[in-house]
Image (cartoon, coloured by chain):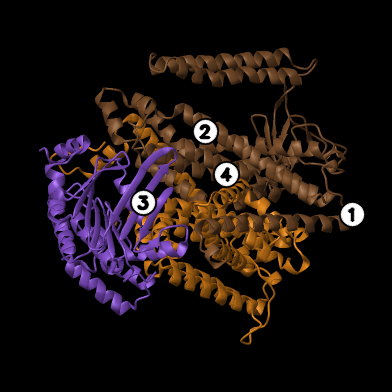
Chain colours: A purple, B brown, C orange
Amino acid sequence: MNSTQSPGAAVRIENLDKYYGTFHALRNVNLSVERGEKIVVCGPSGSGKSTMIRCINRLEQHNGGRITVLGTELNDDVGNIDGIRREVGMVFQHFNLFPHMTVLENCMIAPMIVRKRPRAEAEATARRYLEKVRIPEQATKFPGQLSGGQQQRVAIARALCMQPQIMLFDEPTSALDPEMIAEVLDVMVTLASEGMTMICVTHEMGFARRVADRVIFMDGGEIVEEAPPEEFFTSCRNERTRQFLSQVLGH
Amino acid sequence: MISLLRNQKVRNALLQVFYVGSLAALVLAGVVIARRNLAEQGITSGFDFLYKSTGWDVSFSLLPVTANDPYWWFFLIGIINTLFLGSIGLLLATVVGTVVGLARTSSNELARLLGRTYVDIFRNIPLILQAFFWYAIITHLPTPRAAHEAWGMLLTSRGLYLPAPNVGGVAMALAILPLFAAVALPVWLGRTSRLSRPVGERLVIQLAGIAAALACAVLILIVGRLPDAPLLDFPALQGLNLKGGLRIPPEFSALAVAIAIYGGSYIAEIVRGGFKAVGKGQVEAALSLGLSPWRVFTLVKLPLALRAMLPILANQYVWLIKATTMGIAVGFTDFFMIVALTINHSGQTLEAIGILMAGFLTINLSLAAVFNRINKAIALKGNQLRG
Amino acid sequence: MEMVVVAPPAPGTLEDLRRRFFATPLQALLSLVSLAIMVLLAWKLLNWAIFSAVFTASGGPEACQAAAGACWSVIAARWRIILFGLYPFEEQWRSALACVTVVVMTVLSCIPAFWTGRRIGLVWAAGAALYYVLMKGGVLGLPYVGEEAWGGLALTLFIFVTTCLIGFPLAICLALLRRSGLPWISRITGIIIDSVRSLPLISILFTFAIVLPFALPQWLVGDKLYRVILGSALFFSAYQAEIVRGGMQGVSNGQEEAAMALGMNYWQRIGRILLPQAMRNALPATINQFVISFKETSLVVIVGFFEILASGNAAYGTGEWRFAYVEVYAFIAFIYFVFVFSLSRYGAFLERRMSVGER
């Protein structure tokens, strides 16, 4: 995997199918994401949006179709899986910081043991990204001592320290108290403005309007609607989308 | 080839084949070598030896036994001995544990201190050391000639002698039935009329039931007694030895006492944990309904605590049953000792070990099954009352 | 049921006692009975163990038999056999030093600063090596002493330490195998763990000591001591594996997913993320398992080892001290008590600290 210059789309999903037992979680999903593109995925719970982005770094194994990330196909080849995970960062709903390590160690561990960077370099990178998410002063604390918003920003910094080419966000603000959502979204907006390729599962429609190149609406394991934000919010074609939007924006 | 090894599915399959294969090879190699070694000593493998007579004797048996009996009979005796010692030990340990556990949860500081001291001392001394200790104590008691006597019982270095009823076997078996009925009565009462009768009334019914059962049992014994003999046969000195009565050998009493005391200290902690698990809110709610402390205890605390204790208690019981294998240390012929003696005398090593494993697996699995049934039957429905 | 009364009048001592112990007739009865039992037992015990006891060996067994109380002379006369067994008399300082090594090692492992896989492993490996060199000798000018001469407390501690040293890594392996996503591996490991757990330890020790030589090729049979240690380690690991697995179940799935998403491979995820957290969750139960396994080392007496219990039997069993068995057992019980009680107190302390602390 030496794909900095590899041609084509960042992520290409073709005819993706995924089952949990007999439950058909993803039905024939097709999606192509260009480099530098920002995608926002929304939809009711259980619509398969999280499953889809978890397939991109193989936290879920797909049952049919093809996923190509940065020109490498995601198949049973162990080398490909490892390579892709190195280049794809992920931020989780529940942060999933490592509670037994300090904030700094959380950010340093992967570059050191996966990318084999020397400690000094890893620490410098970690401090730079902690600065970027605006919590350099918390570096020596443990995750349990931080607020939810701060933890999620550390999680973003941790993913960035691997210097990924693509970032996946799986409902990054859903577990946060309202007053902390803004600080996390601010960081994500900054990241978007620097040209990162981003796929975000979120219900923050203000964020979608500001940064998304395309908004995707999923329901029942299918992509129902796909449009640039202004079109998506003003003149969506599908009844289900309209209903969903009225619920999310309605109050 | 390299690309094949990098394939996750191929890798997973290979790993499993390798793991299962190497374990199977290990076991197979062991069995092959063992059979060859045993064959060199002139021992043919197979279970035919079960029908040969043993040629040795056991020190303790509930069933009639002679050295001419076959091996399978000895194994049966061993299992029965293990179960007998186990159930007596469990019963005693549960009684001790309940008393000490209640003392540990009592509101009285002195009682708590006493319970805690008991647990701290007896939990922290190995069971086998306690078994050795009691065995030494009992075997150092006076000889039959100078025995301690109390209420017709005799304490001697050759065991504890109890007065025994002079009754035929059938009557003896029949007499046990009403006792079972007395035990079943409260269970049945609890099932039919959980809350409809006041506790006091239920207690009276239970006591009356137990008294009736005891009277029934005594009546059956009197009717079924052997002709021309007194009802109770007291042990008495004849020459250098004691005759008559029921002898409990020192090996058995030492183990039963050790298991009762050691197991009691563990069960006490389980009892305490069970009561600690009962939510304060539920007790407060019961008190605020105007229930008396006694009824709060029997209607709220005890049922909830029992449910919390039961799974842990089941594990402890399995452990205590396994602890009966300590019998070999003092010479009590439990199941394991019979197996060890069989290996010594017949050389049928693999078969005997197989029987040992099967025996303990069966005992443990059936105990676990019984407890699972009880657990399911009394489990709180839904999850509204947890925590 | 504690009720807070606003500014209660400071009760006098008598009033306080009455309230605590004699609030109701039932309470009073309970207090009196408990007090009576305690005073009676304490008096009898003190009288036997101290006031009427004989302490010095000078009078010999005869002085003891005349006394009403305990005969501690037997300990004074025979303590070396109890502690060191048949170890050569003039080399027994090595045995004593080896015991001290084990104690130091255990104390070190209780200090949080040593709680990383590498440090704790280093402490135990170094301790065990030092113990082995001290006991066996043959190097550094120490005369050689074979395993068959080891005995007493030193042998008990050796069996305990090596059981843990072998059993602990084995337990982690078994736990990992059992939670493996590959169905055959987890199923078969589960069967192995459950069968070992359902067997009595004595039967496993017996199998390893006496039966296993039949099933091994000659060159693999080895010394009986090491076979028994292996069996005891297997038993320990079957129990400890379930404890470790319980600790792993306490670590949320998200932790492993986050590690995967960062590109860590299996061993990195296990070693850096899963195990450190799982071991912390499992710590109280682990210490409890150590306590149990220390008590269970005493079972090796059955397969014919001269550990502390057997050497105790020997100490009173021969000739003139035959009557002093209670004192010898009390002494051994005291030794076990000191080890086991302090370890289990430490476990209770940790449990309390962890339930209050970080999480």
- For label 2, the residue is B372
Could you tell me the amino acid type at mark 2?
A: Asn
State the separation of the CA atoms marked 3 and 4: 57 Å
State the SS at label 4.
helix
Count neighbours of disc 2 (C-alpha within 10 A) and say few if under 14, some if 14 to 19, many if 20 or more.
some
- CB within 8 Å, label 1 to label 3: no
Let me know if marks 4 and 2 both belong to one chain: yes
- CB within 8 Å, label 4 to label 2: no
Please tell me in which quadrant of the rendered image residue B78 appears. top right
> In the rendered structure, which disc, 1 or 2, sits on the residue that comes first in sequence?
1
- Output the chain of dot 1: B
Could you tell me the amino acid type at mark 1?
A: Gly
| Residue lying at 34% horizontally and 30% vertically, measured from the top left | C25
Could you tell me the amino acid type at mark 3?
A: Glu
Let me know if marks 4 and 1 both belong to one chain: yes
State the separation of the CA atoms marked 1 and 2: 46 Å
State the SS at label 3.
strand
> In the rendered structure, which disc, 4 or 1, sits on the residue that comes first in sequence?
1
- For label 4, the residue is B319
| Residue lying at 28% horizontally and 62% vertically, measured from the top left | A166
Q: Residue lying furthest left in this view?
A: A251
- For label 1, the residue is B42
> In the rendered structure, which disc, 4 or 2, sits on the residue that comes first in sequence?
4
Q: Quadrant of the N terminus of chain C?
A: top left
| Residue lying at 78% horizontally and 18% vertically, measured from the top left | B229
Q: Quadrant of the C terminus of chain C?
A: bottom left
- For label 3, the residue is A14
